[in-house]
Image (tube, rainbow, N blue to C red):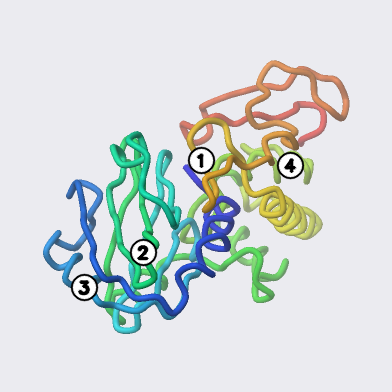
């Protein structure tokens, strides 16, 4: 699933093309991506609306329409691209949402397996939605002290805590694996057992790795594409994720992979992480 760097890349790519534009015609091919909104209300809410802002919250792209916000979580196979040409047959086949803009271009949400979600929220709905999500790791308000306070409250494995969107926004499996390796912390270690020095190292590495991934336009293994339709490049810089059984790039020890921590693959080095 696209994480913070991938969604941030998409938002940065499509934002200039959408700001100040008006949705003139909107169509939806399937209802199964909708959450908390009907097809009729979605189309009525989008048609004629003007885009005031485009930003990211956690793993979601948020299109601010004034009274409402269109919230898009791309899921594993979703993409958002603004096209200035007719769609190719394969693009049209998987185009779930199409919003024609007042300048002749078209915003397209494409989702091969329709694993993403679309929400249309009013002001109160948005406040409830964003209020349930934790702090943004790249914002100044996310300090090592605030991070440490959260970690000291949990006996869960540290990897589970930093992937819990109630505690920290936008970090998923790829970047949790990478940050824990960089910080030298065993992903199964209970968060409450981490020291203040661990808090500072992990805080630093989460921010560093997320920023580096954004600079590389995110990580592509199969489906993820940027807002211009290109693959990301951060997969070339990964130290542990996707490298189970290969030698550690620091010490040469064979990397271990397990699904025991949170049912998703955790890859780590027994020697470098404790």
Dot 3 surroundings within 10 Å: few (below 14), some, or many (20 or more)?
Answer: some
Where residue 71 appears, as percent x and y from the top left, is 36, 64
Foreground tag (4 vs 3): 3
Q: Residue furthest left?
A: 40
Position of residue 193 measured from the top left corner of the image (x, y, whole percent): 68, 49
Assess disc 1: are there few (<14), some (14-19) or many (≥20) residues with their C-alpha within 10 Å of its C-alpha.
many
Mark with earlier residue (1, 3): 3
Judged by depth in the image, the label closer to the viewer, 2 or 1, is: 1
Mark nearest the camera among 1 and 4 is 1
Q: Is 210 placed above or below 42 here?
A: above
> Which of pointers 2 and 4 lies earlier in the amino acid sequence?
2
> What is the C-alpha distance between the residues marked 2 and 1?
18 Å
Query: Considering only vertical position in the picture, is 240 above or below 257?
Result: below
Q: Which sits in the foreground, 177 or 271?
A: 177
Residue drawn at x 83%, y 27% is 249
Residue 153 shows which numbered tag? none
Residue 71: give its label: 2
Q: Of callouts 1 and 4, which one flags the residue occurring earlier in the amino acid sequence?
A: 4
* CA distance for labels 2 and 4: 34 Å
Q: Which residue is mark 4?
A: 185
* Residue 155 visible within the image: no
The mark found on residue 224 in the picture is 1
């Amino acid at each position: 699933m696209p994480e913070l760097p991938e969604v941030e890349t998409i938002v940065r790519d499509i934002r200039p093309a959408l700001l100040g534009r008006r949705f003139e015609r909107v169509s939806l091919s399937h209802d199964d991506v909708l959450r908390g909104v009907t097809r009729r209300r979605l189309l009525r809410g989008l048609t004629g609306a003007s885009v005031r802002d485009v930003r990211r919250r956690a793993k979601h792209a948020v299109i601010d329409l004034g009274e409402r916000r269109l919230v898009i979580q791309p899921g594993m196979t979703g993409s958002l691209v603004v096209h200035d040409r007719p769609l190719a047959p394969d693009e049209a086949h998987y185009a779930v949402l199409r919003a024609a803009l007042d300048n002749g271009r078209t915003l397209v949400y494409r989702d091969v397996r329709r694993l993403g979600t679309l929400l249309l929220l009013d002001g109160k709905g948005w406040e409830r939605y964003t209020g349930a999500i934790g702090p943004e790791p790249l914002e100044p308000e996310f300090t090592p002290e605030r991070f440490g306070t959260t970690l000291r409250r949990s006996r869960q494995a540290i990897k589970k805590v930093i992937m819990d969107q109630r505690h920290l926004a936008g970090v998923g499996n790829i970047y949790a694996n990478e940050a824990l390796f960089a910080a030298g912390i065993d992903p199964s270690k209970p968060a409450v057992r981490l020291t203040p020095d661990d808090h500072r190292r992990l805080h630093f590495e989460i921010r560093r790795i997320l920023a580096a991934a954004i600079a590389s336009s995110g990580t592509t293994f199969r489906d993820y594409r940027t807002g211009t339709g290109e693959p990301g490049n951060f997969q070339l810089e990964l130290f542990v994720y996707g490298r189970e059984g290969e030698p550690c790039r620091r010490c040469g020890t064979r990397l271990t992979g397990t699904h025991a921590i949170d049912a998703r693959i955790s890859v780590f080095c027994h020697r470098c992480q404790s």
